[in-house]
Image (cartoon, rainbow, N blue to C red):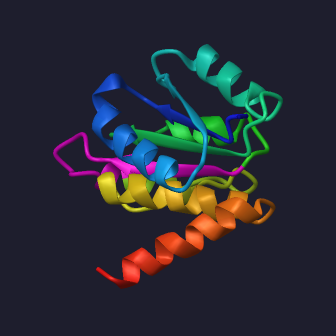
Amino acid sequence: MAKIVLIIAGSKSDSEAVSHCEEHLSKLGISFDTEYCSAHRDPERTARIASSAENNGYQVVICLAGMSAALPGVVASHTRLPVIGVPLPGSSLSGLDSLLSVVQMPPGIPVAAVAVGKPGAANAAVLAARIVALTDIEVRKKLEVYRETLKQK
């Protein structure tokens, strides 16, 4: 099965939120790969991963990052794919700094922003599934079932 979503996290310390995102993608039947790469510590590798994502068959990129959260914007500047930014808490500002970094993108370099932390990681998976469901009927069906389970909670 081809991988549809590429998850990129800025640090291994983000693995709890990454796992939450992966769990939700799996529930929705979305295949994915995960990379750990810092936009600050390894900008060349980040650019390579982002610029090759579309040619590697991905349809959506989810980026999780804390503190200055440059990762989603850097990735968006190197791909035409939709990029979903998940701001993570990582400083004394509890993720507010990350959120502001993700949403303050220049014109032409959009990043979709979701909530801070694990709720955002889950919503990023659902948003990615909604994007994929535009052309994939099986994912659309799984999203409908997912929505019904939310109503029962």
Taking 118 as reference, is 69 above or below it? above
Q: Is residue 97 magenta?
A: yes
Of all residues shown, which one is farthest toward the left?
Answer: 92
Query: Is residue 54 something one can see in this rendering?
Result: yes
Seen in the image, is 10 located left or right of residue 93?
A: right
Residue shown at 39% from the left, 50% from the top: 87
**Residue 80 percent coordinates (x, y):** 79, 44
**Residue 33 percent coordinates (x, y):** 57, 30
Taking 23 as reference, is 114 above or below it? below
Q: Nearer the viewer, residue 29 or 3?
A: 29
Query: Is residue 101 something one can see in this rendering?
Result: no
Q: Nearer the viewer, residue 148 or 83?
A: 148
**Residue 49 percent coordinates (x, y):** 66, 23
Seen in the image, is 111 located left or right of residue 78?
A: left
Q: Which residues are magenta?
A: 82-98
Of all residues shown, which one is farthest toward the bottom?
Answer: 151
Q: Is residue 54 magenta?
A: no
Total marks shown come to 0
**Residue 81 percent coordinates (x, y):** 75, 46
Residue shown at 55% from the left, 44% from the top: 62
Residue shown at 16% from the left, 45% from the top: 92
**Corner quadrant of residue 2:** top right
Q: Nearer the viewer, residue 97 or 86?
A: 86
Q: Quadrant of the C terminus?
A: bottom left
Q: Quadrant of the N terminus?
A: top right
